[in-house]
Amino acid sequence: MCGIIGINSNKPVSSTIISSLKKLEYRGYDSAGIATLSNGLINEVKSEGRVDNLEKNNLVQNMEGTIGIGHVRWATHGIPNSINAHPHSSQNVSVVHNGIIENSTILKKFLVGKGHKFKSQTDTEVIVHLITEHLKSENVINSIKKTLKLLHGSFALGIIFKEQPDLMIGARRGSPLAVGYGPGENYLGSDSYALKSMTNKISYLNDGEFCIIKKDQVEFYDEDGKKINKKVLELTSEDQKYDKGDYKHFMAKEIEEQPLTLKNGINEYIDNSNKNINIYNFPWKVEDITSIKLIGCGTAYHSCLMAKYWFEQLTSLDVNVDIASEFRYRNHRFKEKTLYIFVSQSGETADTYAALDLCKKNGMKTCSVVNIIESSIARDSEFVLPIHCGTEIGVASTKAFLGQILILYIFALKLGLLRKDIENEVFLQKLNDLKSLPELVEKTLKIDNKIQAISNTFNEAKGSMFLGRGFSYPIALEGALKLKELSYVHAEGYPAGEMKHGPLALIEEGMPVVVLAPRDSYYKKTISNMQEVIARGAKVLLITNKSKDEVLSENIWETIEVESANEDLLPFLLTIPLQKLAYYSALKKGYDIDKPRNLAKSVTVE
């Protein structure tokens, strides 16, 4: 979960590398570093903390060199400090790395026996010493080939050499890596986002491939060292310059952007003139799909749980959900008529990509729901459903979550119609209801004052619970996750009916409990569960939808009402106050909302 940038140019590169690293901070931000070649030497500068700390270093401000690599880190091996920060360098070679070298301990023992001395606690440093060792008897290309064959695990690498000041090497296995093309210079990046400010022409390395990047030429090779050709893709211009504007944080902006992003998603998929859903080039006949398996991590996993309810309601398909990090370690019975759907904001989530890769190797039908259409998961899926949310910078996902569940709901509706599991009249009514969703979300966003007032209670408590039934259960899980991510307080999401099967033991006087109880088919049952926690001293925050009917309970601490909608769409509205609760709780604590501690936006390690 680190960010890599490399530039080989005719002009000094340090300031451009620093600018690009700032764009990559969403991938990691506990340390940063840069290395360039100048005057026949590798010049390396590293710092603990954010890229701003690195930029302030006088050595960086005076750094020369027309070829260089940079890195922002999310620690896997070794504590975050300047020694463990990347790049890692010997006298002859400098390396930046995203991923994990699983056999680093064995390799380090071998290298120490050869007389190599290690400075850091990282797994990455073994790569530096392996290349250095091989350079004693091999040329650069053979040194790289021999080194890569010894590495177990995942990696994206950027490498420069003291004795080869005209070239930079990139290599990939498991972790994403992109090459960008410009006039008189070429680039290496862990994703396209940091490269977009310099070029819109990109190629992507596949697993096992490496490349040689010169100022005016790029050559690609497969894992056996055979030269290969690569397509040059032209990136879309939809992700224009994205800044906070008048907002204090990206997350605040992204929460408020949700009506617009939902509208964009609806406009992309709904054909108003024909009163239908446009999902083009679907590669399978619907009768060849009898079951669905939804796979994701974190917030994307909650999107999958939400979609399970919709697919079961709108289709007769058998539906299951899997956590991606567990998926490939089980003994699966792959079935020809199962559609595997992979959900990921970045499209680079390592666990989700590994699950996709396993399904592909077994000849399964694969579909991805992603925000980045140039991503690895999108490129390797047979069918892609983009969520059209635009750039999301805040590490804690907000608009991408609503985008994911929107597209999954639309897909469930379409399959239900095609399979004749729902009648056309029902389909048209739900389609019509969906068009009003952006306006309902916009109205629901106007709840700031009440949320701000109650956020202190959650900050002061040693823990909290989020409860929901049916459609509200995955939203309860997502609300608890958001509070954990941003405010660093313990929070758990539960099905409301499960409280009496153990979690009630945790309820004590004054404990805040969020109860999601919209006026849906589960309402009365959820209110009964709510009364059980109130009777044991909990302070209940009830989140429901507006209605003329009074709430069927007493002794509720606070109530927040969202707008009313049909039962399918209530989860979208219930999500809004939970996002704001997490935001304002973290704001009052003075935490870094866009970059919570220990987390990264694009999780590219297992």
Image (cartoon, rainbow, N blue to C red):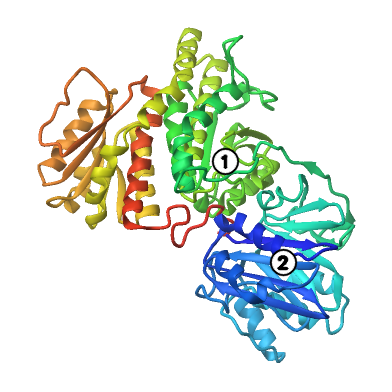
Is 462 displayed left or right of 246 in the figure? left
- Position of the C terminus by quadrant: bottom right
Q: Which amino acid does label 2 sit on?
A: Ser
In the rendered image, residue 271, in percent from the top left (x then y), is placed at 60, 15
Q: Do labels 2 and 1 touch, CB within 8 Å?
A: no
In the rendered image, residue 43, in percent from the top left (x then y), is placed at 72, 78
Q: Residue at horizontal 19%, vertical 19%?
A: 549
Disc ID at residue 130: none
First of labels 2, 1 by sequence position: 2
Q: Residues within 10 Å of mark 1 (few under 14, many from 20)?
A: many
Q: Marks 2 and 1: which is nearer the front?
A: 2
Q: Residue at horizontal 61%, vertical 52%?
A: 354
In the rendered image, residue 557, in percent from the top left (x then y), is placed at 15, 39
Q: 1 or 439: which is nearer to us? A: 439
User: Residue 65 lies in what quarter of the image?
Assistant: bottom right
Q: Residue at horizontal 34%, vertical 33%?
A: 472
In the rendered image, residue 496, in percent from the top left (x then y), is placed at 25, 38
SS for dot 2: helix
SS for dot 1: strand
Q: 451 or 270: which is nearer to us? A: 451
Disc 1: which residue: 342
Q: 554 or 364: which is nearer to us? A: 554
Q: Is residue 85 above or below residue 442?
A: below
Check the image and name the residue furthest to the top.
425
Disc 2: which residue: 14
